Amino acid sequence: MSIHIDPLEKKWIIMTSVIVLLTWVLIIYYAAVENVHPPSNVEVIDSAHLHLASGVGGGEFMEDKLGVHRDADGTLVVTMVAARYGFYPQHVEVPINTPIKFRMASFDVLHGVLIPFSNMNTMIVPGYVSELTTNFTRLGDFPVICDEYCGLAHAYMYGMIKIVPKDDFKLTAEVH
Amino acid sequence: MATSSIKTSELALSAATTDSTNKLAFWNFFVAFAAFALALPMGAYQVLERSGMFPALENAAVYYASTSTHGVLMAYVLSTYFIMGFGYHTAVHSLKQALWSPRFAWVGFWMSTIGVVLAAIALLSGNASILYTFYPPEIAHPIFYIGAALLVVGSWFWCVLMIVSTVQWKKANPGKPVPLIMYGTVLNALLWLWTSLGVAAEVVFQLIPVSLGWVDTLDPGLARVLFSETLHGIVYFWLFPAYLVMYAILPKEAGGKLFSDEFARIAFVMLFIFSVPIGMHHLYMDPMVAAGWKLLHMFGTFMVAVPTMITGFTIIATMEIAGRLRGGTGLFGWLKKLDYTNPVVLASTLSLLMLTVGGWGGVINAAYALDALIHNTQWIPGHFHLIYGGTTVIMYFAAAYWLWPKITGHQLYSNKLVLTQLWLWFFGMWITTMPWHYLGLIGQPRRVDTVQAYQQAEELVRSWDFSMLIMNIGAIMLLVSGLLFVYILFMTSRQPTISKAEQEVSYAEAIHPPLRVPTLLNSLSFWNWAMLIYLIASYGYPVLQFWFIGTPESPQWGI
Ligand SMILES: [Cu+2]
Ligand SMILES: [Cu+2]
């Protein structure tokens, strides 16, 4: 059965398809070539027992392991816990224009983390480790904001991050 | 073929059928707009509270109870009841046949309504301040979840009636195309059945058992994936009837004809099939879904732009026809000739303007790479208020103004006030949501009752001040406009009655009304099978993975 499609409609459909295709191509390009991906990391952890060395994913998020440290391969890693109502450690300092890998876990409920003027934005879901690598391009002090409702004091949950020039950065406490 | 089509159009509905349908439509609309009237001042209060300019208002417990109630009433109650009322009316008047069982419809109505009352008790008493997205492991009082489940199950009764009506009509009219507005309505009912499965599974298998203490723990990752299956499709469930008003009512009100019937059907089946299995764009920033799945859902998400673009084209072409018939000439001259004093014409025009901007905002949310900039910032409420509160709800207003006289038998109260109301809503929506979009871009999170805590970053917080001032003005305009809407409907019931002829319902015709359409554009079962396959492909593994990745589950937390 044939259907009646106006020539104008045909042109419109072609134009729309071209726009959709172009968008796909752009996104695939940035994903494949520039490695731009959302923060996906299917890695489980026992959120209720972050303070223990044993258990699923245990040890990494114990209190004395939190903060900025250098990986075996030289990458700067920030290990952080999100818990009602703060990010721990509450103050971190990292250099500008340097890839920083964040590893974060929740101690209780859902949280999110947002650092304004950066692409540091991820959900922190209990039971899972969130990991993402980002580059800060602005100097200064920025709040580390919880961007998912986590309870009545959610708006008071935050930390601070200081982005400093590369030369001024040194690891204050070496964490092993 | 021709004779039978004449016969159907001559079939008049009995007075009893019309009356019982009007009653059904009226009470569904009544609950919808009562919920709207209750939720509206809460929205305005939240804006004022959050702005920090009225210290006397500040109270986190009240703010989050209010936000949760506002979200549930506007997003779930206003929309669902409006859609049910409009759907019952459409099924009877477009198919010209009595509803299979009005009693069945009333059972659904009461089930949903008891659910709404239960949920409202929990919400208003501060026992369900977990926002309308539920997100465990924070757990509300069990009556909230039981209420939500009843609301959803009650709405399935409506879905069944829409499907039965269509199937009955197709049997009685073999080979003929289902009237356009009904084809859209029944696809929307199917859309809702499919898309509500995710949230239904989350509520029944995770939230109710945990809230009642039957089980101790749940996996929040699984809950989020299930909810995402509902979260995108539901938006199209709300939007679909807004489009139907534009396709089936606007052309006649504007004084013309629909540009194309077949093109509309193509848009409808695309809306159905593409809007459900793509919900993982809501999880771009979540850890527990692998990037490949997110990329897959991104492809599907952009496909939804196609039926929206088709709709934009067909509706604007339809308006052009009307404008030219009314004496408009030149490339844009027809725009000046349209009758903007007609509520349906005005609302559709304003709705399309909001859709154009809101749609491009949606493209940014949907982009795999750009979402990180605006995820969970104030941009997001800006976006969905513009698309739902603006584009969609303004068409609910238009439909109510068109239908109210027909179902109540009273003349519409003051067309002038109606036009004022629509314009005020339009400008109020821009003045509220533009600052929100901007605030999101400059780093303000959504869902906070105050920005006091970020004062250490003084410069950042000060950069938010101006936008926070402007949004107050928009919120007040929306409040006034919304109350005006309810007032107009109330006053209409005290107006003189209109004649039976004026209560007659008829829908727009296309320039070339099709006598037959390809089976695929008249079919339900084909598209259901397609949906099943697409859903299994897009959600099968991402849901199943939770049974073998070994997540240590979470205990429940209070608010
Ligand atoms: Cu929070
Ligand atoms: Cu969506």
Image: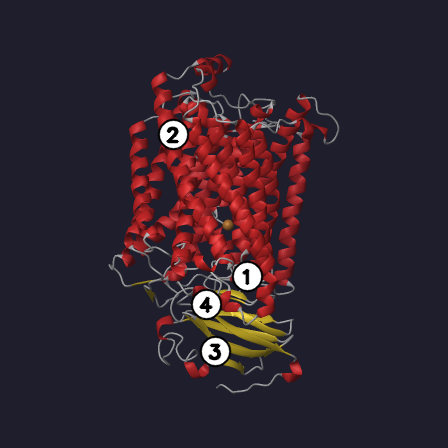
Residue type, numbered disc 4:
Tyr
Confirm or deny contact between disc 2 and disc 3 (CB under 8 A): no
Name the residue tied to disc 1: B444
- State the separation of the CA atoms marked 4 and 1: 13 Å
Label 4 CB-ligand 1 distance < 8 A: no
Count of labels in the image: 4
Residue type, numbered disc 1:
Gln
Name the residue tied to disc 4: A156
Q: Are both tags, 2 and 3, on one chain?
A: no
Residue type, numbered disc 2:
Phe
Q: Are both tags, 4 and 3, on one chain?
A: yes
> Dot 4: what SS?
helix
Decide if residue A118 is in sight here.
no
Tell me the chain of label 1: B
Residue drawn at x 61%, y 40% is B353
> Dot 1: what SS?
loop
Tell me the chain of label 3: A
Name the residue tied to disc 3: A89
Confirm or deny contact between disc 1 and disc 3 (CB under 8 A): no
> Dot 3: what SS?
loop
Q: Earlier in the sequence, mark 4 or mark 3?
A: 3
- State the separation of the CA atoms marked 2 and 3: 57 Å
Measured from the top left, where is residue B83 in percent x and y? 43, 36
Confirm or deny contact between disc 4 and disc 2 (CB under 8 A): no
Name the residue tied to disc 2: B26
Q: Earlier in the sequence, mark 1 or mark 2?
A: 2
